[in-house]
Image (cartoon, coloured by chain):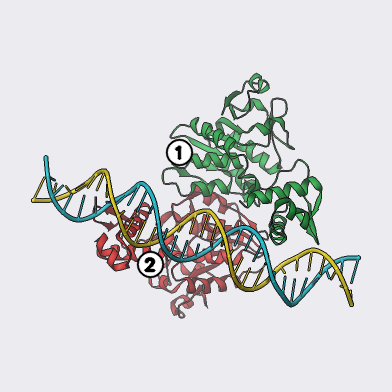
Chain colours: A red, B green, C yellow, D cyan
DNA sequence: TCTTTCGAACAGTCAGGTTGTTCGTTAGCG
DNA sequence: CGCTAACGAACAACCTGACTGTTCGAAAGA
């Protein structure tokens, strides 16, 4: 595949700070020309900066790699989690669906259900726009490049104008003590609004997120009704009154 | 191509009312199996209804065929019109861009410009979502199947919350006497709101629309500042105080 | 029951995307 | 200023996925 090499390059450059084209060629087994083309792509995504002979990373510690590189990562766990989440949603419900790769998996599973769905990312909107069975609502907003998560006052206004049965929320970090956290400040306020406009809140969180905390605080763990995760039961969360559903 | 055969089938069935699979096979030169697959696609789009042995048209007179069949039609004229429209827009402007295939061409031409753009259809949103240079705003709303034009109260609210320099409007019919008309009622109110929230209104209209009138009235011709069209100058419009720009 | 149509499954064809190679051009260094 | 290494445009090989046709068992309708 092609994305996997991009991810490999991204990580190698991030870990080393900067790397030469020749190094990356031997590392990945691809030709130097291919590496140059890859670097061009990654530079366009803002992942790294090219200089003559190589590239240096632009990813800060604690910053997440762009959407295109995350989407094919850890697919099994995401799909398992998404399947469980989809099972928690009953026909006829209205659902607000957060941005992120895990929630995109959920969107794919909801495609042929009879629901009203408002996705918070254009990726999910596109995944659902061909569905004949569900009522699709698009929130307004400004899509963040790459991620295509909708943010800003238009998004908040769309959320405040509606009341959903269920919110499916993804996140970048979750723990009983630190609560739900996100990398992006704007995203955080959208998530908060989504939580506020839903009667029931389900968080879809893969194991890696439970050991991490990101910059922007969204909400305390107690505001979640259920957490679907592939990690082994987290006593802290259960103690906070959250139902932890294993995937 | 593949869309052209679908269009051929659509028109043949519409003109005949209903047609057999064998007739369509000889007409198009394709095998019967291929025709069956095509009919399945068209039935899913609501263009026609299948019965054993053939299909009957569901397109009412005066109703437009679905987006997928129109998009590759008359591309030259559309692109010429779109080029002129894009030329009327100055860098730095904020633009609201209507739905429809002609406006989608405009969107493609705006991809690398420095503008703020709010498209009223998801097709145009997708065309612009990869742009690094422009500020993309997505209106809320419910996308109409196929067309993916955003409609409904969320769309109207998004438009009313903003003021644009320019509105680029497509339509289904335009004449000095009947004004600007659209096939869909919901679309018409969205267009009206777009016109109301812009200081300058440009209509992008190919020749075929100038001889036609559709169901839903949008606005009088006098509310347009300019009409870009590939048709020969229309004296009626010019008399109504509209600048007619040839493409 | 019999005939006709349907659609699943497989195979061939074709277009578009990805990769590698070549080679003229360019940036950076001494 | 000249040299060397790196760059990127252009072409060709390869691969994948979409479209199409054929075959054949199943189903619908007379």
In depth, the one of A54 and B227 nearer the eye is A54
In depth, the one of B202 and B43 nearer the eye is B43
Residue at 64 percent across and 44 percent down: it is B70
Which image quarter holds the C terminus of chain B? top right
Residue at 50 percent across and 45 percent down: it is B137
The residue tagged 2 is: A213
Element carrying mark 1? loop
Residue at 70 percent across and 55 percent down: it is B42
* Quarter occupied by residue A15: bottom left
- In the image, B207: left or right of A29? right
Return the x and y of residue A141 as percentages of the image width and height: 51, 49
In depth, the one of A30 and A63 nearer the eye is A30
Return the x and y of residue B61 as percentages of the image width and height: 78, 42
Return the x and y of residue A118 as percentages of the image width and height: 58, 57
* Quarter occupied by residue B76: top right
Element carrying mark 2? loop
Mark 2 surroundings: few (<14), some (14-19) or many (≥20) residues within 10 A: many
- Callout 1: chain: B
The residue tagged 1 is: B115
In depth, the one of A182 and A109 nearer the eye is A109
């Amino acid at each position: 595949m092609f994305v996997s090499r991009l991810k490999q390059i991204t990580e190698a450059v991030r870990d080393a700070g900067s790397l030469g084209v020749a190094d990356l060629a031997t590392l990945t087994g691809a030709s130097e020309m291919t590496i140059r083309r890859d670097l061009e792509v990654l530079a366009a995504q803002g992942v790294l900066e090219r200089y003559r002979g190589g590239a240096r990373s632009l990813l800060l510690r604690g910053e997440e790699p762009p959407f295109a590189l995350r989407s094919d990562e850890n697919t099994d766990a995401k799909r398992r989690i998404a399947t469980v989440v989809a099972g928690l949603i009953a026909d006829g419900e209205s659902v607000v669906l957060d941005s992120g790769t895990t929630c995109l998996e959920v969107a794919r599973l909801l495609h042929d259900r009879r629901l009203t769905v408002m996705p918070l990312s254009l990726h999910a909107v596109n995944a659902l726009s061909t569905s004949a069975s569900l009522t699709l609502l698009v929130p307004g907003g400004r899509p963040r490049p790459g991620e295509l998560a909708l943010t800003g006052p238009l998004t908040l206004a769309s959320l405040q104008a509606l009341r959903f049965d269920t919110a499916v929320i993804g996140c970048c970090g979750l723990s009983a003590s630190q609560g739900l956290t996100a990398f992006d400040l704007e995203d955080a306020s959208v998530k908060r609004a989504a939580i506020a406009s839903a009667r029931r809140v389900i968080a879809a969180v893969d194991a890696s997120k439970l050991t991490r905390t990101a910059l922007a605080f969204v909400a305390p763990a107690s505001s979640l009704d259920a957490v679907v995760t592939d990690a082994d039961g987290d006593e802290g969360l259960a103690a906070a009154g959250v139902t932890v559903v294993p995937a």
